[in-house]
Amino acid sequence: MSSLAAGTGGHDGEGDRDGLAVGAPGHDDRDSQEYDDGQCGEVARPQQCPRSPGGPVAAMRGHQVHDPIVQPATHGAPVLPALAREDRPAGCIVPYGDRARQSVSQPVLRADPAGRACPTLVGIGGSIASAVVLCEHMFVTADATILHADLDAFYASVEQRDDPSLRGRPVIVGGGVVLAASYEAKAYGVRTAMGGAQARRLCPQAIVVPPRMSAYSEASAAVFEVFEQTTPLVEGLSIDEAFLDVAGLRRISGAPADIAAKLRRDVLDQVGLPITVGVARTKFLAKVASGVAKPDGLLVVPPDGELEFLHPLNVGRLWGVGEVTAKKLHDRGITTVGHVAELPQSALVAMLGQAAGRHLHALAHNRDPRPVRVGHRRGSVGAQRALGQRPKSSEEVDAILLGLVERVTRRMRSAGRTGRTVVLRLRFADFSRVTRSHSLSHPTAQTNEILEAVRGLRAAAAPMIERRGLTLVGVAVGNLDDDSAVQLALPFDRRQHDALDEAVDKVRRRFDSGAVTRAALLGRDQGISVPLLPD
C-alpha cells in the first residue's frame, strides 16, 4: 500500500484512508520514482518448448495453448487450468483455491528436464531453472528471488474468517463508503471506495458489516510474523502486503517458488487468510505478478520469460499509471506495456514529462534496481476523508481538516518524526484531483503550525473549490526526519511551543484517543482511522 499516495488495506478514493509512502510507486497518486538509464544485458532467449505449442512466448501469453490441463511427467495429478482473467497469462498462474487443493497440494512453475524455459505448471516440489542474466544494476540478481505477498480483500477476508456464515457470500466492509469487498461482492461490480448506496444497488444480497480495525491490526501482525519466520529481509508496504527477499535461503528452505508456496500455506494455516504471492527478479515485476495472480494465487516469472510476460499486459499495470496517464497513452494508441517499451525514452519524456517518461521507460523494460529494504522508515504521513456529494460548509471542511491534521501530527510525534512539506489534496465533484503543497522554514510536528499551513493552502484553493465542489480532502506531511536530528531555531526552548501537544498526547496514551478533543470537533464524526505498520 503514511501518505495518501500509498494505500493501506486497499483503500482509495472515498472513505478515510491513512497510508504510508514507501518510495515504491504503485498507484496513480503515488510519487513516481526515477530510475537511472543503465541498460541491462540481453537475457538468454528460451528455446522452443516441446510442451507448449508455439513455444514459451505463446504459452505465457496463452493465446496458442490448446490444452488447458497440463499432465506433468513426474506427478500423477493434473494441474487445474488457470482461472480466467482478461490479462492473466495462461500457463503462468498457479491457482491455490479449494478446487486446486483437491488435485494438487501446491503447484509451482518449473523448467523442463532439459533445462529449457517451459512455462507449464507442475506439482509440488517444482522449481525455476536459473538463467544467467547480465545486468549492471548491482541489486538485481540472476534468479527470481523477490516475493511480493499481498493478502486478498484483507478486511473482508478477516470478517469471513471470523464469521463462518459469511464465507462464500458477498461481504462489504463499511456502510457509507466501501472500505473493502469480498471477491463474491466484486463479481457484481462492487469496488473499494465506492459509495455504499451504489454498492447495495449492484449487489442487493451483499452483507454489510462495520469495520473492526483492531481485528485487522491483529491479523496483520500475525501475518508479518509469518513473513519474518520465512526470511529476515521483509519490507512492509502496508498492513496487508510486503516484499520478501529469499535470495540466500535456497540451501535452507529450497527454491524461491517452494518458499512462496510454503509461505502461502503457513499464512492460511496459522492466520486463516488467503494470500497471493508473485515471484520475480525485481520488486516491480513481483508486484505485477501478484496482481495478475489474484485472488489466492501464486505466479512465478522466470528470468528468461520476463518481457514475454510483461509486454502483453495492459499499460495500467505499470506503477504510476493512473486514469490521467492511461488516457494520454490510450489516446495515442498505446495500450500495452509492450507498446510503451517500443517507444524511445525521449518520446515518453516529451509525452509525459521527464520523471514520468524515464520511470515508465525503465519499468517497461523491467529495469528496477531497488533492493528489499529492511527497517525503511516512511517518507510521509497522511490521512484523508471523503465528504460525500452533499455540499459542506466552510466550517465543516475546516473541522474535518483540523481532525486530519491532529491525526497526522499525533502519529508523527508518536514515531518521533518531524516534517517540512505540508500537502493538501482535494478531489472535486467531477472526481478530478489537485494537490497543493507548502514547505515550512523548519521541520515540525506541531499541530498548530501544520494546521496553519493547511488552512493557507485551502484558502488559496477556495475559488476552485467553490466552482467545482469538494468531495474529498487529504492532508500529508513529507520530507520527514527524526525529531532528534532537527536543528533548533531561536529561541532554543521548543517546549514552550510543544507543551500543549505533549500534554494532550500523554492524556490520550494513558486513557484513550478520544479522552481529549478539541472544542471544534465535539459532536462531529471524525471518521475511521485505519491501522498502519509500525514506523
Image: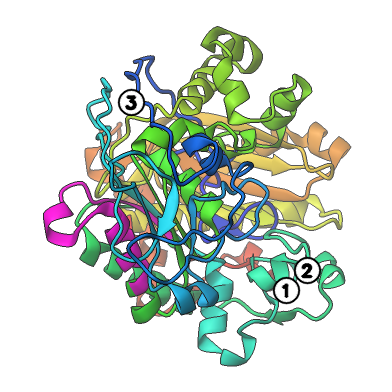
Q: Specify which label sits upstream in the sequence, 1 or 2.
A: 1
Specify the label residue 196 is tagged with: 2
Query: Are discs 1 and 3 less than 8 Å apart at CB?
Result: no
Q: Amino acid at mark 2?
A: Gly
Q: Nearer the viewer, mark 1 or mark 3?
A: 3
Query: Are discs 1 and 2 less than 8 Å apart at CB?
Result: yes
**Mark 1 — residue?**
175
Q: In the picture provided, is 264 more to the left or to the right than 309?
A: left
Magenta stretch containing residue 526, yes or no?
Answer: no
Quadrant in which residue 327 is drawn: top right
Q: Quadrant of the C terminus?
A: bottom left
Callout 3 crowding tier (Cα within 10 Å): few <14, some 14–19, many ≥20 = few
Q: Position of residue 254 (x, y in %)?
A: 20, 58
Quadrant in which residue 156 is drawn: bottom right
The residue closer to the viewer here, 446 or 205, is 205
Q: In the picture provided, is 221 more to the left or to the right than 521?
A: left
- Is residue 507 visible in the rendered image? The answer is no
Residue 61 higher or lower than 199, as above or below: above
Residue 159 higher or lower than 485, as above or below: below
**Mark 3 — residue?**
44
Q: CA distance from mark 1 to mark 2?
A: 6 Å
